[in-house]
Structure formats: C-alpha cells, structure tokens
Amino acid sequence: MNIKLPVADPSSLQMQPPKIRPSRRYAFSLVEVTLAIGILSFGLLSVIGLMPVGLNTFRQSINTSVGTQISQRLMNEKRQTDFVTLIAPANAIEYRYFSDEGDEVAVTSAIFVTKILVANASAVPSSGNSRFTNSSLAKVEVRLAYSPGGSTTLVDAIPLGPQASVFTFYIPKT
C-alpha cells in the first residue's frame, strides 16, 4: 500500500520575521517647535535691530568720502588761482553748494554747504609753540557741513558741530 502523504512546499517553510510597528511616531512636539520659533525670531529681531545702525554708519562714511572729495576739488581750484586774485578782499569769504554726489548745485537742492575763507599773511604753525607770519602764503580754510537744504548755519557756527569738518591748507606765492 502506497500512501502518499502531502509534501510541504519548501518555500512555505521559511519563517518570516514578524513586522514590528512602532508604538510611537518620531516627530517634533509642539513645545519643541514653539521653542525653535522663539529662538529663531529672537535672532532675526536682533539682526533687524542692527540694520538702522549699520545704515547710519554707511551714510556717514559716504558723507565723509564725498566731503573729502569736495574739499580736494576746492583746494585744487584755489591752487590754480593767481595769488593776487586769491588774496583779493572780494574772495575772502565764499559759499558753495554741492549735491550728495559732489556736484555743484543751486542752494535749494544742496546737501553739502562749504564756506571758503582765504587770508593773506597767515600765521603759519612752526616748531614748538611759536608762529611766524609769511606774506608769501595764503591760508585757505574750507568749512564743509552736511546740511540738506543749503542752510549755512552749520558752517558759520563756532565751534563746528559734529556734521561739519574743516580742511586747512596753505598756498605759496609763485
């Protein structure tokens, strides 16, 4: 008697590991998200709070640069002027007005105001505390102020305020 027993398929005999499902999903909690947003907003507000200071410093450096260029321009103009014409009483005080780019403009659109003072026989600084007078020199003083609207108050003030500068140079008689 031949009895055939059913034979199991070998592929069905392999054991599969049971699937483990995590009981908890991994994510950020509401408290963690709130803390992260708070830290991020604190950092951003600090950076935004520094922007006006940075922009103000940037504007001051541009004004200083343009003011120096204006004074150099005026200095070169005075150096090219004849000495007798330079020290004439009509040229003793002169007001000039400039834009924020250093171009000469009318009073109403001025950003920078300059007052140019020319004097003959200036007392020239020398070694020590002594000064000597030289009639072959002209002292040129350029007072420059950041004054939107062209007001001359800042260049006429003594002492000059923080928005004004003085550039002094001597021109020899040639």
Image: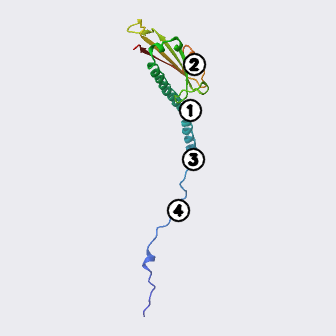
**Of tags 3 and 2, which is closer to the observer?**
2
Residue 125 point in image, percent of width and height: 41, 10
Tag 2: amino acid: Leu
Tag 4: amino acid: Arg
Residue 44 point in image, percent of width and height: 55, 39
Q: Earlier in the sequence, mark 3 or mark 1?
A: 3
Compute the Cα span from label 3 to label 2: 55 Å
Q: Residue at horizontal 59%, vertical 19%? A: 152
Mark 2 is surrounded, within 10 Å at the Cα level, by few (under 14), some (14 to 19) or many (20 or more) other residues, namely many
Residue 2 point in image, percent of width and height: 42, 92
The residue beneath circle 2 is 154
Q: Report helix, strand or loop for mark 3.
A: helix
Q: From the viewer's perspective, is residue 26 above or below residue 77?
A: below
Front residue of 76/39: it is 76
Q: Earlier in the sequence, mark 3 or mark 2?
A: 3
Q: Residue at horizontal 48%, vertical 11%? A: 119
Q: Report helix, strand or loop for mark 1.
A: helix
The residue beneath circle 3 is 33
Front residue of 140/174: it is 174
Compute the Cα span from label 3 to label 1: 30 Å
Q: From the viewer's perspective, is residue 10 above or below residue 171?
A: below
Tell how many labels.
4
* Residue at the farthest bottom position: 1
Mark 3 is surrounded, within 10 Å at the Cα level, by few (under 14), some (14 to 19) or many (20 or more) other residues, namely few
The residue beneath circle 1 is 52
Q: From the viewer's perspective, is residue 31 above or below residue 103?
A: below
**Of tags 4 and 2, which is closer to the observer?**
2
Checking the image for residue 21, the label placed there is: 4
Mark 1 is surrounded, within 10 Å at the Cα level, by few (under 14), some (14 to 19) or many (20 or more) other residues, namely few
